[in-house]
Amino acid sequence: METPVSILSVKDLVIKFNLRGKTLTAIREASMDLYKGESLAIVGESGSGKSVFNKAFMGLLDKNGWVESGSILYKGKDLANYKTENDWLKIRGKEIAMVFQDPMTSLNPLKTVGKQVQEAVELHQGLRGEAAKKVVLDILKDVGISEPEKRYRQYPFEFSGGMRQRVVIAIAIACRPEVLICDEPTTALDVTIQAQILQLLKGLQEKYSLTIIYITHDLGVVANVADRVAVMYAGDIIEIGTADDVFFDPQHPYTWALLSSLPQLGIKGEPLYTIHGTPPNLFKEIKGDAFAPRNPRALQVDFVHRPPYFEVSETHKAKTWLLDPRAPKVERPKSIENIRAQWGVL
Amino acid sequence: MNTPEKLLEIKNLSIEFGKKKKRFIAVNDVSFDIYKGETLGLVGESGSGKTTIGRAIIRINETSHGDILFKGRRINGKIDRALDQEVIRKIQMIFQDPMASLNERAKVDYIVSEGLYNTRNYSTEEERKKKVEQALLNVGLLPEFASRFPHEFSGGQRQRIGIARTLVMEPELIIADEPISALDVSIRAQVLNLMNDLKKRLGLTYLFIAHDLSVVRFITDRVAVIHKGRIVELAETETLYKNPIHPYTRGLLSAIPIPNPKLERERQVSFYDPGTHKYEGDAPKWVEAEPGHFVLK
């Protein structure tokens, strides 16, 4: 493998929101490198900050939110300093584009599908009229829409859910972006359609040499598409590594808990592992490891000091004190060892 | 289990919507039984008719042909008031999205008691309170929660309230319509554990409606796969997963992503092509391929 080139480098990013007079810290000093041409999956539960994190790369934070500190380096520019819409227009779509979750709501119901894709083509490729239309038809074909001439003139309501998601992808692709962020691209779809859309995205990634970030909570999808996986909890990336690292050799107790609670990996007749308690209140300052209060194996230090990244291998690191050489030896839970045995990794 | 008791029997059920030109057959000649104490999974994609069947059982949707028998008595079509009341009590439903299915303006006490009020299934105020308290305890919530509003609860807790309000009716059959699809992974585990636990403790029977075959494997005893209003395959869960016969079931199984990167890299999805059957020519037959394993051929 050649040495990966980082095209997006996030460092100690802090994002805050003002909510009813109180301040909420949604992203807490999260750092991440995105390598050119890879698929990175960001997993986490609702409220873990995975969507907010990615919206910050496109200047799509809600009005009451702001980047407090840290940097987002993209091609040598720090996006964390971007303030005006004019700044963002140079990035949004052209460089980084997004595919949203629900294709039922992310298209304009009053415009034909062709026009909606054409808008993006005209804006970003500077084409007009027939020339633009020709490009649109090519893109529609690329995303697997048959009879593009006929489909060009149709409205979103005439499309099924899977087909609409293809249109949403077409719009994102039409901007010729470097990075594509897919926010739960298949959550609203049936499994067979989901498989088709994932296949499509993989194909497009190759054809257009895209770098893709998948945001999802479905670990099945993650295993299917991701080269690398980042696990997010309470606004921080607590473990990151290749898909094999994270699935077969998880290090952080939260990753253990997440994998153990999957019904797909459970043993019938036995209760599934459950994570006790609730995620921390982000209005309050979090001390130590954010997962400690829910972790039955937490060390004392977990409640006092926040763990830094410890490297497991060149590709794999996790924020847990368990990896500190001074830490006592803590065995992985039986459920995780069971899963690993079942997978034949041991 | 020698001869399992049939709690619910569905015989040649068809459900149609609309008239004449607009007629749409949502459920087409479906038959299956639910045995007492089992969890039967009903799996299909959106628009396959799975929810319509669930709704027909609790008498929300009218049926066009066929019978639904509950403990041997017909419960679809016109039935007398006493039986109707019994069906309301004994067959309950859990809904998909706990964020949308609870009345935001009512306290938990009212939400859980609503069924009791409607069927006047209590004699004194004290008895009602007792029943609500017991239902909340059964789902692992504190009785004090009765005086709170739904917005004070997390998604998992709200789904528990949704389950409590069915339990208060002392049901025998619970129709769970995608009860965990809207929940986060860690909360899913809690709700699935709770459902299994209640089944054991209270002797419940479930019809578990879902589109996600991976979850169904964990919780169900038998699975029926439905496609375009027809059940195409029905078998014990492990049999179905190990030896799927109908091409649609195979396609569906091959499409579920497995949380294992090694397997996923090698996975081949086989997409179902309905053109391989010629249903128009000769009517499909419901065949028993091996004991207890039925398939539409």
Image (cartoon, grey):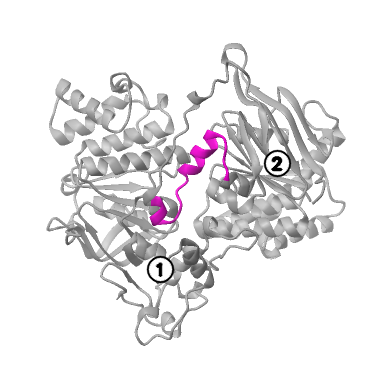
Asked if both marks, 1 and 2, belong to the same chain, the answer given is no
Looking at the rendered structure, the secondary structure element under dot 2 is loop
Asked if residue B214 lies left or right of residue B268, the reply is right
Q: Which mark is residue A250?
A: 1
Pick the quarter of the image with the C terminus of chain B.
Answer: top right
Q: Are marks 1 and 2 in contact (CB under 8 Å)?
A: no
Residue highlighted by disc 2:
B292
- Residue A167 picture location, percent across and down: 32, 32
Residue at mark 1: chain: A
Q: Amino acid at mark 1?
A: Pro
- Residue B137 picture location, percent across and down: 71, 63
Bin the neighbour count of mark 1 within 10 Å (Cα to Cα): few under 14, some 14-19, many 20 and up: many
Q: Amino acid at mark 2?
A: Gly
Bin the neighbour count of mark 2 within 10 Å (Cα to Cα): few under 14, some 14-19, many 20 and up: few
Q: Which residues are magenta?
A: B243-264
The quadrant in which residue A83 appears is bottom left
Residue B253 is covered by the magenta coloring: yes
State the residue at coordinates (29%, 44%): A98
- Residue A22 picture location, percent across and down: 40, 64
From the viewer's side, name the closer residue of A113 and B99: A113
Please determine whether, in this image, residue B81 is positioned above or below residue A148: below
Dot in front, 1 or 2: 2
Please determine whether, in this image, residue B72 is positioned above or below residue A81: above
Asked if residue A182 lies left or right of residue A298, the reply is left
Residue at mark 2: chain: B
Count how many numbered circles sit on residues in the image: 2
From the viewer's side, name the closer residue of A8 and B112: A8
Is residue A233 visible in the rendered image? The answer is no
